Amino acid sequence: MEAVEERRSDSEEDVVTTEQSTDGAGPENADIEYVLSELMAIRADMVAALATPQPHLARIHANYRDSARNLLHYLALRRRDLRPLQLRLAALGLSSLGRAESHVLATIDAVLGVLHRLLQRAWQPASEETAVIDFAHGELLLAEHTDALLGPATPGRMVRIMVTMPSEAAENYLLVHNLLQQGMDCMRINCAHDDAAAWARMIEHLRQAERSLGRSCRVVMDLAGPKLRTGPLEPGPAVVRIRPIRDAYGRVTAPARVWLSAGESPGLPPSPASACLPVPSSWLAHLRIGESVELTDARDAKRVFRVVDVTGHGCWAEATQTTYVVSGTLLRRAHGGGKPDDRECRIGELPPGENSLTLQKGDLLILTRDLKPGRPASYDSAGKILTPAVIGCTIPEVFDDVRAGQSIWFDDGKIGGVVEKVEQTQVLVRITQDHLKAVNLRADKGINLPESALRLAAMTAKDIEDLSFVAQHADIVELSFANSTQDVEVLQQRLASLGGRQPAIVLKIETRRGFENLPDMLLTAMRSPCCGVMIARGDLAVECGFERLAEVQEEILWLCEAAHVPVIWATQVLETLAKEGRPSRAEITDAAMGPRAECVMLNKGPYVVSAVRVLDDILRRMHTHQAKKRSMLRELHLAHYSVIRRNDILAGAPDA
């Protein structure tokens, strides 16, 4: 029974239930005495927890002073294993403290009051130790702080929806309008992409949409932070693969579409093309519809293109066989007249392909300090590695903090390894992640070092430069890779030095260090008038381990609720729907957990408008079922269709 935890009326119900049970064979007084002594000891620890940090509490903003006290009470409560005590409390029909986050001392006092009454003792806490935040006040504080940070809730849905803007939002007003119309409450602009001019256009589109729809929306700007990524790679081979679409039997169902345009001034194809090839304009001018173009491709295979359309800017040809072409591949009109020079030409300069490093378990990877383009491994005639693959990293200072034996992850945890040796100019990494087949590592992919104590400031020179725009235009600034109280203080100081309007602060928790330092960072952020926390589940999963992510995000939710600080649930929510147009079942279940937080964030994708609409529907449905970690017991329609009730109806029993 989870009474007492939400409202005083619930605690009164507990009293009645327990007192009634004492008439006869009720619980032994010894059990009540034991529980009472345990809770009194816990309460003493909670009260003592406020003594030491008084100087720090004095710096907390007035909006959060009571909340900071409640957070410290909660931390004191959770320093011990409460599970045995919870079982005893439940056996007595009392609250098991499972919903104490937003009103910790009030919950303890309510249970203590019942226990003292069961023992027929008078008890009243000292006036200076009385709970400031009661059951209703705790929920009210979180609601007020949420409104201040994220804006008022949409009717019928308490959880806000945040959407990350694609670059397209700077040019496409209709996209922003549709997102707002479908339920977007917060527009998120990632400062790692685009520039100030594009950000300004996105915000102007939002303001225009707000005026059109009569809705309001917060502007959230995300500082890029010190994102550790792989460096560039040498260009890949300049080869173009042209491949028709085939069915399961290998039969061509759609030919490949090849756009031929003048190499002197290549024109973009008027519709999607399988390949774009530059050729001399003099040769292009002689092509006619129905004509065949013959070639020998890069594999010495004989191939034919058939011309299907001729325009003033280029020609369309179709290919029914897979073809590989390179710069200089000879093209010949099969039956064209004129001079030989008019019948033949060579394909012009093709852009180099994207390169990648092919890695598998046991391979050695060299990570260098510089950003000199890396290259794939070289092999001998027997297929054994001669020289390992090499790639740089964007922040070479991390080499000073890396030690042999520590784990390292690439590309959002897709590739894992261990640091084998640290040298002055490079780090040797042994790939340990086991895959069914080799995996590819490309340039500009994330690097995580969860076991290394990296001494990286949360704000880079670019972030400091971007902050002047952010402070002027954003309602909220998100601090990426917030790892310490110093990171939070630096942001607060920078904002104060800019003067004028002060956007609210959101701490993005995406590293193990940030998670471990969250209590102190919360108390620091609460010096500002408005703050929040984002659970950035992408990097956080890699840093803490995918198997521990669920536990970590729960702990963040608990701490933030105790501090009455709103939480944004982020990364890969309805990701497949936003990118491919159809969600997975697991994604729907994940999105339904949104009411555990105050806001859910969607990433960009071609179908992001549909994703907002679906998320809005899910959150509205869950609104009457879940609030934070409390299940709401609204009428259950399924209960009307039980087997017993159906049988009663079939038997002619009167409808109750």
Image (cartoon, rainbow, N blue to C red):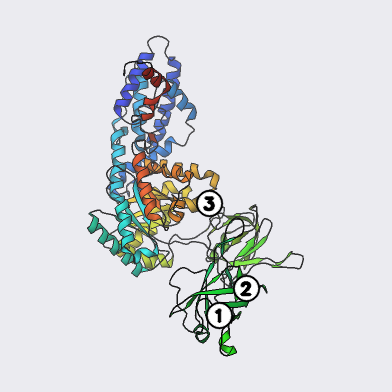
The residue where tag 3 is placed is 543
Q: CA distance from mark 2 to mark 1?
A: 20 Å
Label placed on residue 303: 2
The quadrant where residue 645 appears: top left
Q: Nearer the viewer, residue 410 or 44?
A: 410
Q: CA distance from mark 2 to mark 3?
A: 50 Å
Residue 546 to residue 383: above or below:
above
Mark 2 lies on a secondary structure that is strand
Dot 2 or dot 3: first in sequence order is: 2
* Residue 437 horizontal side relative to residue 617, left or right: right
Image quadrant occupied by the N terminus? top left
* Mark closer to the observer (3, 1): 1
Q: Position of residue 331 (x, y in %)?
A: 59, 80
Q: Nearer the viewer, residue 564 or 333?
A: 333
Q: Position of residue 65 (x, y in %)?
A: 31, 44
Mark 1 lies on a secondary structure that is loop
The residue where tag 1 is placed is 349
The residue sitting at 30% across, 46% down in the picture is 145
Q: Position of residue 341 (x, y in %)?
A: 58, 89
The answer to the question of whether label 2 and label 3 lie on touching residues, with beta carbons closer than 8 A, is no
Residue flagged by tag 1: what amino acid is it?
A: Glu
Label placed on residue 71: none
Q: Nearer the viewer, residue 434 or 526?
A: 434
Dot 3 or dot 1: first in sequence order is: 1
Q: Nearer the viewer, residue 505 or 249?
A: 249
- Asked whether residue 565 is in view, the answer is no
Residue 166 to residue 119: above or below:
below
